Image (cartoon, rainbow, N blue to C red):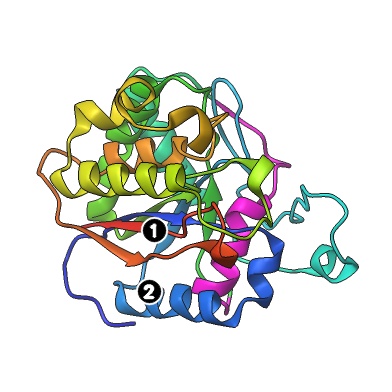
Amino acid sequence: MMGMSARMPVIFAAHGAPPLLDDEAWMRELNNWAVAMPAPKSILMISAHWEARPATIGATAAAPLIHDFYAFPERYYQTKYPAPGAPELAVRVRDLLHKSNIKFADDRKRGLDHGAYVPLVAMYPNANIPVLQLSMPGLDAMELYNLGRALAPLRDEDVLVFGSGFLTHNMAFAFRPGIPAWAREFDDWTADVLLRFDVDALINFQVRAPAIHLALPTWEHFAPLLIAAGAVGDKKPKVTFPITGWWMDGAFTKRSVQFD
């Protein structure tokens, strides 16, 4: 893995679903992205699939994966990702949250959900980098952004802060071919806001973004992006999109984001 900067980037990845594991092109895109980034000492994962208040720190030792999906082929329930736990990172996260007066808790039995492990299988297939998952403490945009701000020092400690979700997520259009105009409109708006790093627009996306009710009938999959944006820190970042396109040529954008 070739690093280009002393600071770790912060990233947001579209995490697909278990079938991503059979999508050779997308798996290759994710792996190439990981190879192009500096090698992290550890990974702090924030997935759309874990909301718990207060912000909750997951298992710090190897824990079973959470196969939190239904009616998929049996092989997806056999997926393994035996990454090491990250107890040192957990200590540091607790310290940062405490310093920012953010309440937190621990759930020492909580393993990685599919929003966490599916992209990791593609990006870091050797499962040799310690991973810690942190919950989202609800769906308040400013609170999520401020949580990310509290985590920003991790960038200088070789920790990859990794938000995992989807910029568009309307399950009524899942597995339906054809890219709706509203999905393109919302994706284009988000890309523009991110390139300009317009934090106010990002936080107020529910009233500023077009086609919001179709793009995100519920917005837990967008929420990790707000934490990632907060974790960038004080300086305006360089923003790139290592992966773009549409999952199965449908309504779910694959757009993934890197903040440098």
Question: Is residue 198 shown left or right of residue 40?
Answer: left
Q: Secondary structure at mark 2?
A: helix
Identify residue type, mark 1.
Ser
> Is residue 63 among the parts visible in the rendering?
yes
Q: Position of residue 44 (x, y in %)?
A: 45, 50
Which residues are the magenta region?
A: 105-126
Residue under the image location 21 percent in, 26 percent down: 200
Label 2, residues with CA under 10 Å away: few <14, some 14-19, many ≥20: some
Identify residue type, mark 2.
Trp
Taking depth in this image into account, of 16 and 207 the one nearest to the observer is 207
Q: Secondary structure at mark 1?
A: strand
Q: Which residue is mark 1?
A: 256
Taking depth in this image into account, of 22 and 179 the one nearest to the observer is 179
Magenta segment includes 116: yes
Q: Position of residue 141 (x, y in %)?
A: 38, 23
Magenta segment includes 73: no
- Whether the residues at callouts 2 and 1 have beta carbons within 8 Å, the answer is yes
Q: How many marks?
A: 2
Question: Is residue 39 shown left or right of residue 108?
Answer: left
Most distant residue in the left direction: 235
Q: Position of residue 19 (x, y in %)?
A: 70, 67
Q: Which residue is mark 2?
A: 33
Separation of marks 2 and 1 at Cα, in angstroms: 10 Å
Residue under the image location 30 percent in, 60 percent down: 158
